[in-house]
Image (tube, rainbow, N blue to C red):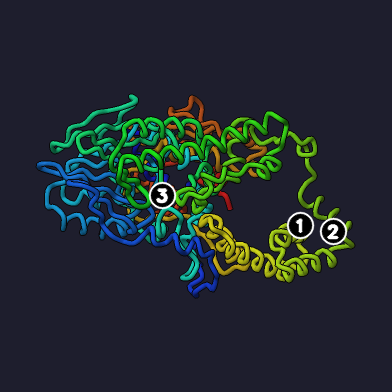
Amino acid sequence: MRQILHWFLYAVVFVMIFTAGCSDSRSSEQISAEAAPDLKAHSAEFKKEVIKVTDGVWVAVGFGLANSILLEGNDGVVIVDTMESAEAAAPVKAAFDKITSKPVKAIIYTHYHTDHIFGARVMAGEDRPEVICQARTLYCLNRIATITRETTYRRAMRQFGTMLPPGGVINDGIGPRLEYDQSKTIALLLPTRTFAAERMELDVAGLKLVLVHAPGETPDQIFIWLPRKKVLLPADNYYNSFPNLYAIRGTAYRDVMGWVNSLDKMRALKAEYLVPSHTRPLDGAERIYETLTNYRDAIQFVHDQTIRLMNRGLTPQQIVERVRLPAHLAGLPYLQEYYGTVEWSVRAVFDGYLGWFGGNASDLFPLPLRQRAMRFARMVGGETALLEKARQAVAGGDYQWALELTDHLLQLDYEPDKVRTLRATALKALAEMQIASTARNYYLTRALEVTGELHIPMMNIKDKALIHQLTLEGIFRSMAVRLDPEKSAHVDTVAGFRFPDTGQAFTVHVRRGVAEIHPWFPDKPDLVVTVDSNIWKEIAAGVRNPALAIFKDLKKEGGTLSLIRFLRLFKST
């Protein structure tokens, strides 16, 4: 269970060792932005209500980005997925309590995404349920939380439009809005039971549940089958939108054919009720079978056609220009591109098989961005002429071209205020055209960022009880990717850290731009720090002043100034 402790907090802190969090400077004024009619109409999918699917099965739709599902047994209930925050979970819990007062016997996480796990404590209430998930959930959370946490958080805020002012978000494609940011409360419960096998059968409160590992949107994804009720909970492997085979917030490659295989397993069950963790439930065995079949066919079509053209030597951009869903799939309401897109999926499949190089030799060692911009400006007659071309593109409604021209102008730092204004105009106009909520939100957020009207801060957390659940392994693992290569270019220093209260020790060897870290005390350290683990965690999370702690709370060997210089090597600003 030690692994669980460190993935959970790092998923939400985003303020790491000796780095102060930024203040929230989101725009408070309403934004005026048109929206594609289809995207507007899609909001009806998220009418806020608790829907009775069949006897003993309810789903809360429209309360947050994800659904929460209530399964009522003889003497208790099971809750599947728990919303993205305490604030999102509270009204769902109140609604469920009106349905039944039976205790919560179990909570099941279908996968590791925030919108499915961070309301668990609220959903459990005063009960002590078993909390169950697939074993790989721990690895997935750890990877994203300790390595790519900062960029993933910023990009997620853009994808979901979380910080946009009123008038920005129409919906988020798979839910009305993500109710999770630095102002929300994390209410996670740590898993008490995981399973690594392909399936696990449970009997909870008289309910027979079959949990099946079904990689798709995430590698730890599971679906849940209630054989007696013929109810299938597909988690995020099906929702009413073209699937997010790639998320623009940044994800590792999603195994597209693994997703297809998981859908095939679900089709074989011949479910009579389908209750996704996003969007509304479906009923009718024939309808569900047909829907899942078309869904898997759409995914396989994009995969297979990308591979076919890839094998013919086409580049990603050339393939994007050719792959379109066949008419019988493209017209289906549940394959419209509200959340994922065919174009992004093609690029993801290509990258998943062949990596970043598309095959065009000019991409092997491209010109540096500034040099390319300078040559482009000279080609059109100079920077002033380039700026005028950007103005003409905006005036003529050629917004993608305008955006690309401002890329060059920003590299040249030419008339930056004018360029940012043009860029924001192009971004906003592109946003208004999008049926994909993710693209719209990203464009609008970047438009406000480029003009300085919005700033995305690092996620901060002040709850010391949560901070104390952070593990030391997580702190030290993250230090390696925060080392400043310039500051440490000529450094060769070994620091040893001791934590008497836990009996743990760590080595941090900074060696000319690399931090080698081990969970043991070094033989011949240059610096030694002895400190209580909770104090160190508070320093790392930014709730304890590191300068005061160095003088008051840390026992040091090797000199105070030397320690301060060493720790500053990991300060990102």
- 94 or 463, which lies in front? 94
Amino acid tagged 3: Val
Contact? badges 2 and 3 (CB < 8 Å) = no
- Identify the residue position indicated by label 2 in the image: 377
| Residue 334 on image: x %, y % | 45, 49
The residue located at (44%, 36%) in the rendering is 216
Q: Is residue 519 above or below residue 430?
A: above
Q: Amino acid at mark 1?
A: His
Q: Is residue 340 left or right of residue 308?
A: left
Q: Nearer the viewer, residue 14 or 539?
A: 14
Number of the label disc, if any, that sits on residue 167: none
Mark positioned earlier in the residue sequence (2 or 3)? 3
Q: Secondary structure at mark 1?
A: helix
Label 1 crowding class (10 Å Cα cut-off): few <14, some 14-19, many 20+? many
Question: Dot 3 corresponds to which residue?
Answer: 12
Residue at 55% of width from left, 62% of height from top?
445
In the picture shown, does residue 308 fall above or below 407? above
Viewer-nearest residue: 167 or 259? 259
Q: Residues within 10 Å of mark 2 (few under 14, many from 20)?
A: many
Residue name at image x 24 percent, y 42 percent: 107
Instruction: Provide residue 255's location: percent of width, then percent of height.
Output: 50, 33
